[in-house]
Amino acid sequence: MGEISPEKKSGCGLLNAVFGRRSIWPRRSTSTGSLQKFDPNDNVNLVQSMPGSRRQSSILDSSDAPLHKQADRIIERPGQNHSRSPPVYQQHHLPPPAAASRSVPNKQGCGQARKVPQNGLAVSGELESMITDHQQSKGAGKLVRASSSNVMLFGNLGNLRQPGGNGNSTANNVLDYLPKTAKDQSPANGKYSTSVMGNVLKKNEEPSLCRAISTRMDPEQLKILGNEDYKNGRFAEALSLYDAAISIDPNKASYRSNKSAALTALGRLLEAAFECREAIRIDPYYQRAHNRLATLYVRLGDAEKATYHFKQAGAEADPDSMNRAKKVEVHLNKCTEAKRQRDWNTLLKEATLAIAAGADSAPLIFSSKAEALLKLHKHQEADETMAKGPNFDIDECIKFFGPIGSTSLLLVHAQVNLVVGRFDDALTSAQRASRLDANNKEVNTILWRTKAVALARSNGNDLFKAGRYSEACVAYGEGLNHDPCNTVLLCNRAACRSKLGQFEKAIEDCSAALGVCPFYSKARLRRGDCYAKLEKWEACIQDCEMLLTENPNDEAVGKLLKEARARRQ
């Protein structure tokens, strides 16, 4: 019988190389730090174990071992035009190939190099090529085999880096290899629409593995974390955690109720009321949600609904909040009667008392107070009242108070903006009110008046800039026919009359404007200048001193005051 080849002596050559006793290429160590650099010009990808590893690579004993014949190999050598992609992991550079064998340095410090036959290395290189081709065909070209049974992400293996990198780059996106449920949460721009950072849900944050994993948390655990943040005053963080719990289990009433509490603490009362409504829809007998919603209704000025939900709250009803609801209801009834009788002083008084009793975030009550101040020609106080009131989004107000209540609110906004000179805002509010209630006569009247005043002011300004003061004075007068107490138009007409030398009439317009808005500094300065032109120095000095009280650093007023004092003597 002929001589048996070494492969046949130990069984199948390829299987023996993978599972057998002595391998024609070295075994892989489970340590990722032992991987070496791949050279595309070589026919082999040689990996050597780290020193101290339990399982050392089996390499041919010496360079004197006979070379195996080509015919005995299991896998044929690739052809000349065969191309294959190199493995993606980085290894230390191998020395150039020798004619028949390679020398591998001994990392254990023995000094003597071990040699591996060239044809044995070719089998290892071919197997490595097959693995690489398989990975690429499966779309896993960015994966490497860290051990015989594990596949790891390249760039996240600690000491393994990409070829040509600086050793610190991790260019691959970890989320590409997460489970589909986590990967689907990251859009193309690399950010989550509702991403999670640690235990806190935040918007528009960069994605990370821990955020994706935390979306799989138990919603009860998220609620507990939210409760801790709420107790510690971290309301925004608590809100994010409650949102995360709701996104996992949207049909849990307690999550909605707790979210309502966080929104209330952040001053977002309308949103808080919507969440309480949803909690009650899920569980109609949830007494805590009824009490929370009733308390919100008191602050928002709906005492009737507050009373109903306090009854549904049972033992959870807050006695103090119930007393506030009763007081607010009494004052609101008086406000309704005063408005019906057009008793503006009583309306102003009762609206103020209702706000003090507990309706501190009721936009309709604030608008009633501002309307009473407008009717009493206290424009500046009306503007201040609207500024102190809640600044809710009009769309949320329409959703909560309905179109009728929202129309009333928009009308008051339009009138206040008009008298203080915010013409564009006034026109916007009036037009929005008209769209909500197109058949309302009061709405149409205010819209028409707002358009007329805004147009008169625009025409007057254009004529004044052109030096046509008489025509500008007429244009401002047309606007005052629609709104006789408009301080901006009065002051502008006073400027035209001053240019025309009509100082007495200019003083009349400025005084009318100051009667409506006592702190209108432009009207006071213009009146003081007219007093100086008429040589009424005492009156001029009084206006200048009042202006300097408001703004001590006004150089123009200081100069006018100095001149008036000098001329008085």
Image (cartoon, grey):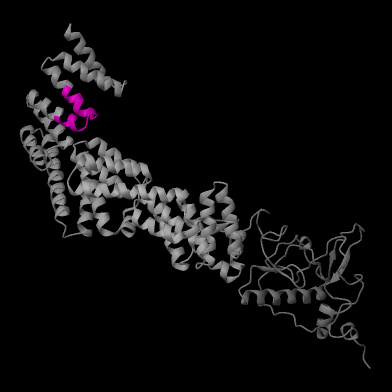
Left or right: 497 in relation to 121: left
Picture residue at 24% right of the left edge, 16% below the top: 559
Left or right: 136 in relation to 245: right
Left or right: 430 in relation to 504: right
Picture residue at 78% right of the left edge, 68% below the top: 46
Left or right: 242 in relation to 40: left
- Residue 513 lies in the magenta-colored region: yes
Vertical side of 58 occupied by 489: above or below: above
Place of residue 373 in the rendered image (x, y in percent of width and height, measured from the top left): 23, 39
Picture residue at 66% right of the left edge, 60% below the top: 155
In the image, which residues are magenta? 512-527
* Front residue of 525 and 462: 525
- Residue 29 lies in the magenta-colored region: no
- Among all residues in the image, which is located at the extreme top? 569
- Among all residues in the image, which is located at the extreme bottom? 1
User: Is residue 277 something that shows in the picture?
Assistant: yes
Q: Main secondary structure of the magenta part?
A: helix
Place of residue 73 in the rendered image (x, y in percent of width and height, measured from the top left): 81, 83
Q: Indicate the quadrant where residue 495 lies.
A: top left
Vertical side of 154 occupied by 523: above or below: above
Vertical side of 131 occupied by 393: above or below: above
User: Is residue 192 something that shows in the picture?
Assistant: no
Place of residue 360 in the rendered image (x, y in percent of width and height, measured from the top left): 37, 45
Q: Indicate the quadrant where residue 484 lies.
A: top left
Q: Indicate the quadrant where residue 550 lies.
A: top left
Q: Quadrant of the C terminus?
A: top left
